[in-house]
Image (spheres, rainbow, N blue to C red):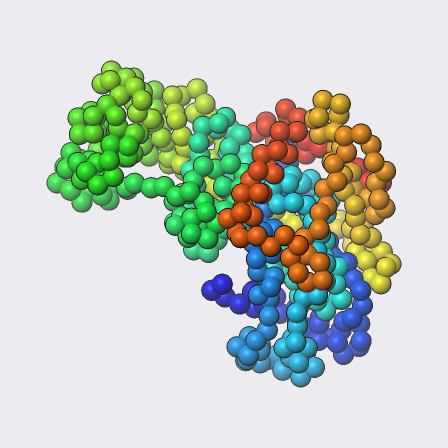
Amino acid sequence: MPTAPALLTDRYELTMLAAALADGTAGRDCVFEVFARRLPHGRRYGVLAGTGRLLEALPHFRFGDEELAALRDQGLTDRRLLDWLADFRFSGDVDGYAEGELFFPGSPVLTVRAPFGEGVLLETLALSVLNHDSAIASAAARMVAAACERPCIEMGSRRTHELAAVAAARAAHLVGFAASSNLEAGRRYGVPTTGTSAHAFTLLHDDERAAFRAQVDTLGTGTTLLVDTYDVEQGIRTAIEVAGPELGAIRLDSGDLPTLATRARELLDELGATGTRVIVTSDLDEYAIAGLMAAPVDGYGVGTSLVTGSGAPTAGMVYKLVERDGVPVAKRSEGKNSVGGRKHAVRRHGDDGTATAEVVSSAPVGPRAGDRDLVVPLVRDGAVCDDVAPPEALRRAREHHARVREALPAEAWALSRGEPVLETLTA
């Protein structure tokens, strides 16, 4: 990893640890939970993503000589603290929702049981990974739903931090995006990658025909030609003249996309290119995708809106201490109450298999027909339970998400603002 995970944290985690080591409370058995108090305004459900990335980072969460030197340089010189960190290895247990699972307000998506000193160190890393990736996955899931089985391509790398771009591509693929433009996402996670050319390639050449010829000669007739650098209709005619009616696709990246896509389809058919697909890009979000549903569009490329969570760049998750030495504890501040005690959670379903409620309880939930337990073991005694390669972990999460979203009631797919589609029941 390019940056030591141990330093991807907030200073106050270490100052709390130093004080707890000094007064002897650092070894108390504690339970921390990650949950969202609410969903972003108007959203019907959330999608948990990032668990696999967090489990990837956990074995590397160490304080070696370089990390300890960086802490000393920043004024953290307490000898007891530095000696403890030098020997630190996470030894606790982690449970949580399977990656790709849906979540609702109060869902205990991650539970960490460990001595206080170990558990508190994971707060920032856990929240930064889960909040970012879940925000991207939740937005991407809405886009996939709006696309109604037409493929979506993630292409937001140029609109976010370079490492966030890789995580965003992973999160988008988890919920159904077909491919990404990001090569590192392809290398690290096995996300299919795709890409052809930008307007700069057309402008490089003396005319559009020369640019199209160079691209087709290099990539074959199955490529996608960007036809809106100058005049769209002429661009389409030139594309078919160069590539023939077997051209794979054209791309539209500007203008009145519904009108342009309709005219493009008509013109392609007139030219005999009935199999040539029409791909659209240009600042799309789930609402723009839904607005193109009646247009003859075959696929969507999404960038800025996706990597910024389509208006909700964080999932709003928090990391709270809920149990200490077997005794429930809870925050009681106004507007930010939490419920003490380690939680159990099940998804309740009707006779037809449709999900009806999320049940969260500090005591085991009495089983009913159709209930599905949501909390699964992730780490035991510091070791990841199912230590598979990152591409395999992503493949499993993608398959899990596809299964669980099928159980959502129909109103979950509405893009209009509303309450969470499942009520969270506390027992």
| Total number of numbered discs in the rendering | 0
Give residue 402's position: percent from left, percent from top.
Answer: 58, 34
Q: Is 212 on the left-hand or right-hand side of 85?
A: left
Question: How far from the left and from the top, in percent, is residue 74?
Answer: 56, 77
Residue 35 in sight here: no
The quadrant holding residue 141 is top right
Going 44% across and 31% down the picture, which residue do you hit?
151
**Residue at x 12% of width, y 40% of height:** 206
Compared to residue 343, the image places residue 286 above or below, namely above
Please tell me which residue is depicted at 67% across the width and 66% down the height of the picture. Answer: 90
Q: Give percent across and percent down for residue 181.
A: 38, 44
| Residue nearest the observer in this picture, 50 or 307 | 50
Residue at the outermost left position: 206
Question: Is there any visible trace of residue 253 in the rendered image?
Answer: yes
Q: Quadrant of residue 205?
A: top left
Kindly identify the residue that appears in the image at 54 percent across and 34 percent down.
142
- In this view, the residue farthest toward the top is 270
Task: Name the quadrant of the C terminus.
Answer: top right
Q: Position of residue 140 (x, y in %)?
A: 52, 38
Which quadrant of the structure image shows residue 328?
A: bottom right
| Whether residue 297 is situated above or below residue 81 in the rendered picture | above
| Above or below: residue 336 compared with residue 19 | above
In the figure, 15 relative to 390: above or below? below
